[in-house]
Image: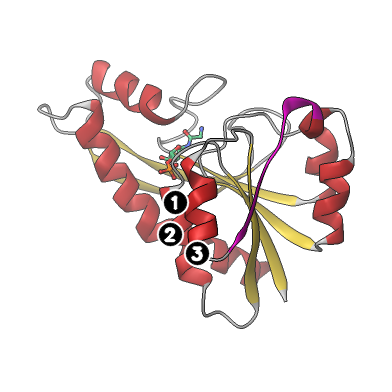
Amino acid sequence: MRNIAIFASGSGSNAENIIRYFKNHTNVKIDSVWSNKKEAYVLQRAKNLGIEAYSFSREEYSHSDHMFRELQKRKIELIVLAGFLWLVPPEFIDAFTIINIHPALLPKYGGKGMYGSKVHESVVKNKETESGITIHLVNTEYDKGEHLLQVKCPVFPEDTPDTLAARIHELEYQYFPAAIEEFLNRKL
Ligand code: GAR
């Protein structure tokens, strides 16, 4: 069994989509969902779908090896960041393969502080004519790891950050789970 842990900070619609996608897979399991926010809706979504869900503090994340050891004990092969806002500590990067999704065409609109609606606000403000998603490996810098997949979509003059976010979310739902599956198959 290939065990995946999902890290997420917010609503978790991508996390839910990934959980549903792998629900009936016989060789891939979404083992658990982890959030840096106790009240993040992603934790509720995960529990509703029968997936173990945990929150953690900054201290537990960065300065204790409890969480790290727990992930190792669970034999996590891949960590998927699905709207996760903290930088990943080096010991996690060394021990696990980690994939992130970013709601723009990196290297544009990436880096610290560039997440979720902030990305779409900047893209609309700059009158870009295209945006999209980037699925990439995670290293010690924000949004800098090797790209696995980019998919583009148009940005229309009448778009607001919200209409663009909705279009980008659709792309994420369509491509992210399959990209994870393909990555695991290639890694075999
Ligand atoms: C997604 O659009 C994801 O690409 C973005 O946060 C959103 C989470 O939505 N991630 C980043 O901005 C990371 N820098 P969700 O909670 O509904 O899945």
Residue at image coords 33%, 19%: 122
Confirm whether residue 94 shows in the render. Answer: no
Q: Mark 2 and mark 1 in contact? Answer it, CB < 8 Å.
A: yes
Name the residue tied to disc 3. Answer: 49
| Residue 154 picture location, percent across and down | 22, 40
Q: Which residue is mark 1?
A: 14
- Is residue 170 positioned above or below 29 on the image? above
Amino acid on which disc 1 is placed: Asn
Q: Quadrant of residue 64?
A: top right
The yes-or-no answer for disc 3 within 8 Å of ligand 1 is no
Is the residue marked by circle 2 packed among few (<14), some (14-19), or many (20+) residues within 10 Å?
some
Mark identifier at residue 5: none
Q: Nearer the viewer, residue 144 or 72?
A: 72
User: Is the CB–ligand 1 distance for label 1 below 8 Å?
Assistant: yes
Circle 2 SS class: helix
Residue of label 2: 17
User: Nearer the viewer's eye, disc 1 or disc 3?
Assistant: 3
Q: In this view, which residue lies farthest toward the top? A: 125
Badges 3 and 2: C-beta atoms under 8 Å apart? Answer: no
